[in-house]
Amino acid sequence: MNVTLSQLKTFERIVRLGSFHAAARELRLTQPSVSQRIRELETMLRTRLFIRRGPRISLTAEGHALIEYADRLLGTAGEMIERFSTRDPLKGMLRLGLNESFALICLPDLLRRLEQRYPGIKTSVFVGDTGIVSKKLDDQELDIAVVSEPAVGPHVRLEPIGKNKLGWFARADFDVARGVLSPSDLCQFHLIVSPPTAQLHATVTQWFADAGAVPLRVSTCNSLSVTILTILHGTAIGLVPVRVMQDELERRRVRLIPVSPEVRAHRVSICYQISEFGPGLKVLVDLTKELVAQHKLFV
DNA sequence: AAAGATCGGTCAAGCGATGC
DNA sequence: GCATCGCTTGACCGATCTTT
């Protein structure tokens, strides 16, 4: 036997209303049924939940402890029911998948605005590259995602929101007298790029291949923040989204290396499960677009 | 008198065995 | 693999008992 939600609901009603009879009336049961549910709960938990003094009852210490668990579990159950009855992810745990550019620039603002509009909303944020976020979308492990050029099934809708411009960056003391660099020129330096699961990796590999160039030393890093740190330390030259480096450029801590040909920009889309699209998700899609425009994240 | 506990009965869901 | 049958178990009820 397991503890059931109906037992916890009964327990919670007795605590709130103060008697077995009142709980029975509200739950549309008979008093013996209520007594039986509590007896089963006490048997399973191997404890007494109420002190019975004739017609008066009071909670034991264990009963006080259980009411907190009961409230949490019943709250979660209620949330789950609302989430699935309304098909609205904003009524439960919202599962967000984001590329790092969006996460670094817009996420705090997005969470703040969601909190204002939906107080108490819970979010699970996954930050990752195209390959990983695409798979999670495909496996229905995410409700909505902002991702570059995803490969997803027909159950996921894509709404293009702009292009993520990419640039090669080096520490500020990099010798600018070199002028515009070709892929072959860049091959001489230690380079740092995203790992193979990322769209950026495929793009940079193609960029070198088109020029018939083979880089001598390429490191990969799945974290954009750490890649930026590596560039700031002068350890390597990195290919990262230009918008993400804007602050460092303005503070003259990094230098954008002019290259020819330019690295192809990535098309970024908002993606979501079609089955879950409704008013709630539409608000989120609009809000995401608004933030992207406001922060001039993509061109 | 009021409220919780116990008893014995009914009903429906679950589960294993069996047949197709 | 699926449908059917019969047994078991759990959920519930009304009547009644016990306690304060």
Image (spheres, coloured by chain):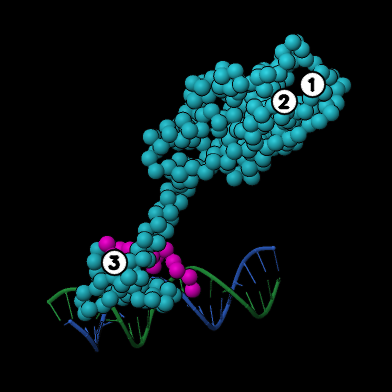
Chain colours: A cyan, B green, C blue
- Residue at the image point whose x is 48% and y is 45% from the top: A93
Question: What is the x, y in percent for residue A140?
Answer: 60, 44
Earlier-in-chain disc, 1 versus 2: 1
- Residue at the image point whose x is 64% and y is 24% from the top: A241
In terms of image quadrants, where is residue A177? top right
| Front: mark 1 or 3 | 1
Say whether residue A196 is visible: yes
Q: Which mark is residue A237?
A: 2
| Front: mark 2 or 3 | 2
Give the overall secondary structure of the magenta segment.
helix
In this view, the residue in front, A103 or A96, is A103
**Extreme residue toward the right, this view:** A212
Question: What is the x, y in percent for residue A170?
Answer: 69, 22
Q: Chain of mark 1?
A: A
Same subunit, labels 2 and 3: the answer reads yes
Amino acid at dot 2: Ile
Amino acid at dot 3: Ile
Looking at the rendering, the stretch of residues picked out in magenta corresponds to A1-16
In terms of image quadrants, where is residue A173? top right
Question: What is the x, y in percent for residue A155?
Answer: 62, 38
* Quadrant of the snapshot with the C terminus of chain A: top right
Assess whether mark 2 and mark 1 are in contact (beta carbons under 8 angstroms). Answer: yes
Q: Which mark is residue A14?
A: 3
Q: Which residue is mark 1?
A: A186
Q: Which mark is residue A125?
A: none
As for residue A93 lying within the magenta part, the answer is no
Judged left or right of residue A264, residue A253 is left
Q: Chain of mark 3?
A: A
